[in-house]
Image (tube, coloured by chain):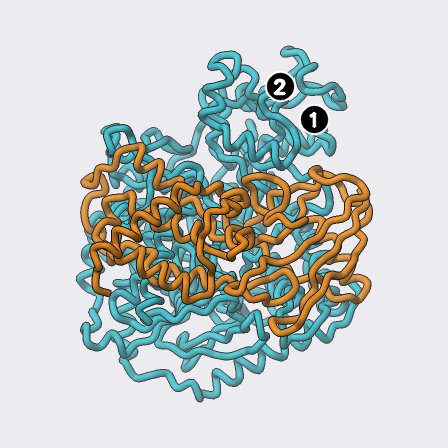
Chain colours: A cyan, B orange
C-alpha cells in the first residue's frame, strides 16, 4: 500500500501556491462534461457542492435529512477561527498554524495544517460576502472573542449560533445552484455503499428513505463529507442521525481509516438523567471563564451544594493547575472530572457530575452581568434540568463531541481509493489528537470552498470526460449487496430493538475507549464487541419492510457499521502505546497524571486497511515530521 | 408519570389517517418529550407493533427537523422552544395528550408525524441568497455594518426552518419564514443588489407551493421556536410594495 501524502516540496508557506499551480485545470467548456457526487450537506459538503457547481460541473448532492439545511454543522455554537489579526494582538497565519499543531498534540500533518491557517482568512471574507450576520462592534467592524488553546482573539461568531449561520450561508449558495439546475439535490437519501470501477470511485448506492427504493448513481468522482462517528458512544452531542456508514462502507471497499482512537470528549455537557436519555447537550465552553468547578471534598456527601461550606469543597482544577485553573484545555478538564466522579465525589441524584458554580462570579459582578454574558445558556440549562443556575450550581460532565480520526486523505484530500475525496470531520487530517475550539467550522469550509475545487480538477483531467457506464456490472453487484444486507437485517426477526444494541455498544466503548483507556479495558472491549455484533445480527428485531419509510431499518444499518468501527477504534487505541490529546492511556502518564507522549514510537498516523470481515485490519503508517513547530510537551500548570 | 396519548397514524400520503390511543406508563419527568416517544416506540417494537414515525435530529432546538402539534400547539405549550426542547415536567400524571403532524397543503404527510417540507427549500432556491461565487471577494472588514443592523439581521437569520409558522397559521401561510430571509439579506449591504428581485421571486414561489396569504393573525410568531418577530413581515410587505412599484422586469 502506497501511503504517499503528496505534500509539495519547498518551504511550508509556498506549498499550497505551488500545488495550486501544479494542479491541472479543466477547460471551462469541458466542465459540464464531468459529474461529481457529493455526499453530505454540512459545512464541507454544502460548500463543496455549491463551489463545484459554480465552476460548471454537474453535481449531485445527497443528505439523509429532509433538507440540506439541517446537517449537524448547524449545531456548532462557539465560532470560527481565522488569522485576520483584526484585534492587532499579534495573530498571524503562522501563529494559527502553530497553535493548531500544538493543540493537536503533534499528531497532525504540518503542511495540511499550514494550508488550513492560510485559507482561514478567505473563509471569513467569503461568508461575509454571502450575508452571514457575524457579530459586529459599534463601529461596524467584525467582533472577535477568545477561545481555548490560544492567546489571541481570533474567533468570529454569530451569537451562540455560529454553525447555524455559516451553514445557512453555504446552504444558500447551494440552494442557488439547485435553483439553476447545476446541483441535483437528493434529500432523505442514505448512501449505503460506494461503487468502484477498475479500483476507482465511480458512484454510490443510495436508499430513498421515503420509498425504500435502492438505486445507484454514476459519476467521475465521489466526495464524502459525511461527518464524524461520535454516535459510536450512543450518547454524544451529535444529532440522532449522525453515523459512520458512508465512511465505513468506503473503508470496506479499500479506503484506509486513520487514527480512529482520536476522539474528543467535551468537558461541559449536561450529565445524563436516566437510562431513557437519547443525547447529551453541550453547554458552551465559555462558561468556564466565570464558573468555578468543584466537587465535595469527601465522598458520600449528601448536603445540597449551597450548604457545603467553603472548606469542604475541592476546586480541583484550581488546585491542580494554578495558572490555567478552570480554563485548562478540553482533554485535561474532561479527564479530571472523570477522576473525581470515579472517586465517588460526583454530584447530583446519580452522582454523575461536577459543579460549575457561578456564586462567586454573581457576587463579584452582579447577576446582571452574568445574565448578559450567559443568559441564553442559563435558560437552556434550566429548560433541560429544571434547576436555576443563578441559585444552585450547574452540574456538568464530559460527553463525546467530535472525532479527529477519519478516512485517510493525502494533501489533495484524496483517499487511498482514487477518485474518492473526503472533506470535513469525515477525514482525519488537520486536528491531530485534539481539536481546538472553533477549528471544526474552519476546516469544513476550508476543505469545501478552497481546497476541493482545485484538487478535484487534477483528478478529473487524468480520468477524462468519458462518462462512467451505469450499466457496468459493478453497479448492479454493489446494489445487490446493499439489498441483501437490508434483507438480512429485516430477516433476523429477533427479539431486541436496535436501540438496545446501540446503547450496549455505546456503554462498552465509553467504559473502555472513552476518557481513559487501558490495555486491560481495550482487550476486554475487543472481546465483547464481536460477541455483541454477532448477537446483533441474530437477535435484532426490525419491524416493517424495506420498501417504505422505516426508521428502525435506517438505524439498524447504521448501528451495524458502528459496531465494526468500534472494534477498529479499540484496536487503534491498543496499538497507540502513548497518551496524546484525547487519547489517554493510563499506562502512559507522568507522576502528576498528565499525558505522556512517545514521539520516538508514535509520531505517525495509524492508517488501517480493511482485510475482510474475518481478518484483522492491517496497519500502515504515515510518519509525521515536525520541521516548523518544534516538538514540546504541553503544560498548563 | 402515566399518560394517555392520542397520536396521529397515517401509513402514507394517500392514506386517510386517524388518531390512535396509547398508554405511556412510568415516564420520568426529567425525560424530554421526544424521549417519552422513544420509550413508547421501544415498547411498541418489543410488542411487535410498528413504531410511530417522527422526525428529529439535533435534539437541541437548532436543526429544525422536529416538530409536531401537541394539544393543538405547534411544538407544544412551551414558548420559544422546539419540540425537542420540551420536557415532561411540563405535563402531569394522568394527562391526555393529542399529538399530530404539521397540517398544510404544502406540507404533505410522509408517514404518521413526518411531513415533507421541501417546499421551504424551493422558496430558498428561488431567491434566498446573495449571488456571490466562491472567491473571497474582498476583505471582510471592507463592508462596515452598524451593530444594530447586524443584530437585527441576526434576529431574522435565527429562523430554524421548522415550519411551525405554517402549522400555526389558519391560512397555512409561510410569510414569517419568507420574511426572515428577506429581512436578513435586506438589512445587510450585501443583499441590496438583488433585494427587489429576491422578494418577488420568493413570494412567487411561496404562492405556487400552495401556502396561503398572511392576514396578520400573529399565530406564527406565537408558535415560533426562534421567536421571529412579526415586524419582519411588515418589512417583507414594504419590500414587496417597493419592488412592485418600481416594476422590475423578471
Q: Nearer the viewer, residue A166 or A324?
A: A166
Is A383 positioned to the left or the right of B226 in the image?
A: right
* Disc ID at residue A255: none
Q: Quadrant of residue A200?
A: bottom left
Asked if both marks, 1 and 2, belong to the same chain, the answer given is yes
Q: Is residue A303 above or below residue A184?
A: above
Residue at 65 percent of width and 47 percent of height: A512
Marks 1 and 2, how far apart at CA: 10 Å
Give the percent coordinates (x, y) of residue A501: 71, 58
Q: Residue at label 1?
A: A345
Residue at 70 percent of width and 51 percent of height: A524
Contact (Cβ within 8 Å) of mark 1 with mark 2: yes
Q: Is residue A351 above or below residue B14?
A: above
Q: Nearer the viewer, residue A511 or A360?
A: A360
Judged from the image, the secondary structure of the residue bearing numbered disc 1 is helix
Give the percent coordinates (x, y) of residue A203: 43, 76
Give the percent coordinates (x, y) of residue B92: 76, 39
Number of residues whose C-alpha sits closer than 10 Å to that of mark 1, classed few (under 14), some (14–19) or many (20 or more): many
The chain carrying label 1 is: A
Residue at 29 percent of width and 30 percent of height: A137
Q: Is residue A626 above or below residue A260?
A: above
Judged from the image, the secondary structure of the residue bearing numbered disc 2 is strand
* Disc ID at residue A314: 2
Amino acid at each position: 500500500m502506497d501511503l504517499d501524502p503528496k505534500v509539495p516540496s519547498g518551504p511550508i508557506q509556498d506549498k499550497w501556491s505551488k500545488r495550486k499551480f501544479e494542479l491541472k485545470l479543466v477547460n471551462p467548456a469541458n466542465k459540464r462534461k464531468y459529474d461529481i457526487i457529493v455526499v453530505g450537506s454540512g459545512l464541507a459538503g454544502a460548500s463543496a457542492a455549491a463551489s463545484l457547481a459554480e465552476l460548471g460541473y454537474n453535481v449531485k448532492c445527497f443528505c439523509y435529512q429532509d433538507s440540506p439545511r439541517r446537517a449537524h454543522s448547524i449545531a456548532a455554537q462557539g465560532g470560527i477561527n481565522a488569522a485576520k489579526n483584526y484585534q492587532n494582538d499579534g495573530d498571524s497565519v503562522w501563529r494559527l498554524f502553530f497553535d493548531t499543531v500544538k493543540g493537536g498534540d503533534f499528531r497532525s500533518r504540518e503542511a495540511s495544517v499550514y494550508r488550513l491557517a492560510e485559507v482561514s482568512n478567505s473563509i471569513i471574507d467569503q461568508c461575509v460576502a454571502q450575508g452571514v450576520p457575524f457579530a459586529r462592534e459599534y463601529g461596524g467592524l467584525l467582533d472577535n472573542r477568545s477561545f481555548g488553546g490560544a492567546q489571541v482573539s481570533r474567533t468570529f461568531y454569530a451569537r451562540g449560533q455560529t454553525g447555524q449561520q455559516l451553514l445557512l450561508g453555504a446552504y444558500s449558495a447551494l440552494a442557488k445552484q439547485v435553483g439553476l439546475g447545476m446541483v441535483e439535490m437528493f434529500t432523505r437519501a442514505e448512501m449505503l455503499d460506494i461503487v468502484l470501477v477498475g479500483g476507482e470511485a465511480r458512484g454510490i448506492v443510495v436508499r430513498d428513505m421515503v420509498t425504500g427504493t435502492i438505486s445507484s448513481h454514476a459519476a467521475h468522482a465521489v466526495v464524502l463529507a459525511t461527518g464524524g462517528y461520535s454516535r459510536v458512544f450512543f450518547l454524544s452531542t451529535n444529532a440522532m442521525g449522525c453515523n459512520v456508514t458512508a465512511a465505513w462502507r468506503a473503508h470496506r471497499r479499500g479506503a484506509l481509516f486513520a487514527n480512529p482512537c482520536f476522539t474528543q470528549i467535551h468537558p461541559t455537557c449536561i450529565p445524563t438523567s436516566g437510562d431513557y436519555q437519547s443525547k447529551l447537550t453541550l453547554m458552551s465552553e465559555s462558561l468556564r471563564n466565570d464558573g468555578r468547578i468543584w466537587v465535595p471534598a469527601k465522598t458520600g456527601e449528601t448536603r445540597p451544594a449551597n450548604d457545603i461550606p467553603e472548606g469542604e469543597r475541592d476546586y480541583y482544577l484550581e488546585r491542580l493547575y494554578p495558572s490555567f485553573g478552570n480554563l485548562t484545555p478540553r482533554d485535561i478538564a474532561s479527564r479530571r472530572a472523570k477522576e473525581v466522579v470515579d472517586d465517588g465525589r460526583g454530584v447530583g441524584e446519580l452522582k454523575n457530575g461536577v459543579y460549575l458554580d457561578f456564586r462567586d462570579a454573581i457576587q463579584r459582578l452582579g447577576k446582571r452581568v452574568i445574565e448578559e454574558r450567559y443568559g441564553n445558556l442559563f435558560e437552556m440549562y434550566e429548560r433541560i434540568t429544571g434547576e436555576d443556575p443563578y441559585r444552585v450550581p450547574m452540574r456538568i460532565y464530559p460527553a463525546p463531541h467530535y472525532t479527529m480520526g477519519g478516512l485517510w486523505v493525502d494533501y489533495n484530500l484524496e483517499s487511498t481509493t482514487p477518485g474518492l475525496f473526503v472533506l470535513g470531520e469525515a477525514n482525519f487530517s488537520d486536528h491531530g489528537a485534539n481539536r481546538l475550539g472553533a477549528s471544526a467550522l474552519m476546516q469544513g469550509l476550508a476543505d469545501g470552498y478552497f481546497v476541493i475545487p482545485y484538487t478535484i480538477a487534477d483528478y478529473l483531467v487524468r480520468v477524462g470526460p468519458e462518462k462512467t457506464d451505469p450499466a457496468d456490472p459493478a453497479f448492479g453487484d454493489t446494489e445487490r449487496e446493499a439489498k441483501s444486507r437490508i434483507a438480512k437485517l429485516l430477516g433476523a426477526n429477533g427479539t431486541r430493538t436496535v436501540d438496545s444494541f446501540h446503547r450496549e455498544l455505546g456503554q462498552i466503548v465509553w467504559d473502555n475507549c472513552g476518557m481513559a483507556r487501558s490495555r486491560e479495558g481495550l482487550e476486554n472491549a475487543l472481546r465483547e464487541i464481536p460477541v455483541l455484533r454477532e448477537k446483533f445480527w441474530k437477535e435484532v428485531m426490525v419491524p416493517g419492510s424495506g420498501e417504505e419509510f422505516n426508521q428502525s431499518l435506517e438505524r439498524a444499518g447504521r448501528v451495524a457499521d458502528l459496531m465494526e468501527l468500534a472494534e477498529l477504534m479499540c484496536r487503534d487505541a491498543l496499538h497507540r502505546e502513548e497518551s496524546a490529546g484525547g487519547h489517554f492511556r493510563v499506562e502512559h502518564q507522568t507522576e502528576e497524571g498528565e499525558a505522556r507522549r512517545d514521539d520516538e514510537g508514535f509520531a505517525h498516523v495509524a492508517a488501517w486497511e480493511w482485510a475482510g470481515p474475518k481478518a484483522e485490519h492491517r496497519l500502515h503508517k504515515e510518519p509525521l515530521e515536525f520541521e516548523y513547530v518544534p516538538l514540546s510537551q504541553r503544560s498548563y500548570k | 408519570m402515566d399518560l394517555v396519548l392520542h397520536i396521529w397514524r397515517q401509513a402514507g400520503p394517500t392514506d386517510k389517517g386517524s388518531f390512535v390511543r396509547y398508554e405511556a406508563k412510568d415516564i420520568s419527568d426529567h425525560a424530554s418529550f421526544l424521549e417519552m416517544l422513544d420509550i413508547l416506540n421501544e415498547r411498541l417494537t418489543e410488542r411487535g407493533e410498528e413504531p410511530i414515525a417522527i422526525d428529529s435530529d439535533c435534539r437541541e432546538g437548532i436543526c429544525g427537523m422536529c416538530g409536531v402539534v401537541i394539544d393543538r400547539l405547534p411544538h407544544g405549550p412551551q414558548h420559544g422552544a422546539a419540540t425537542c426542547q420540551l420536557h415532561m415536567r411540563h405535563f402531569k400524571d394522568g394527562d391526555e395528550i393529542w399529538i399530530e403532524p404539521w397540517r398544510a397543503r404544502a406540507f404533505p404527510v410522509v408517514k404518521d408525524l413526518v411531513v415533507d417540507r421541501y417546499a421551504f427549500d424551493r422558496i430558498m432556491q428561488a431567491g434566498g441568497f446573495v449571488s456571490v461565487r466562491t472567491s473571497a471577494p474582498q476583505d471582510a472588514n471592507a463592508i462596515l455594518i452598524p451593530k444594530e443592523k447586524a443584530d437585527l439581521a441576526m434576529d431574522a437569520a435565527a429562523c430554524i426552518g421548522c415550519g411551525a409558522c405554517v402549522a400555526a397559521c389558519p391560512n397555512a401561510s409561510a410569510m414569517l419564514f419568507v420574511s426572515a430571509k428577506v429581512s436578513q439579506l435586506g438589512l445587510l449591504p450585501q443583499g441590496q443588489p438583488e433585494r427587489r428581485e429576491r422578494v418577488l421571486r420568493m413570494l412567487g414561489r411561496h404562492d405556487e407551493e400552495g401556502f396561503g396569504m398572511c392576514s396578520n393573525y400573529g399565530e406564527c410568531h406565537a408558535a415560533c421556536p426562534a421567536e421571529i418577530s412579526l415586524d419582519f413581515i411588515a418589512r417583507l410587505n414594504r419590500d414587496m410594495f417597493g419592488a412592485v412599484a418600481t416594476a422590475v422586469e423578471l
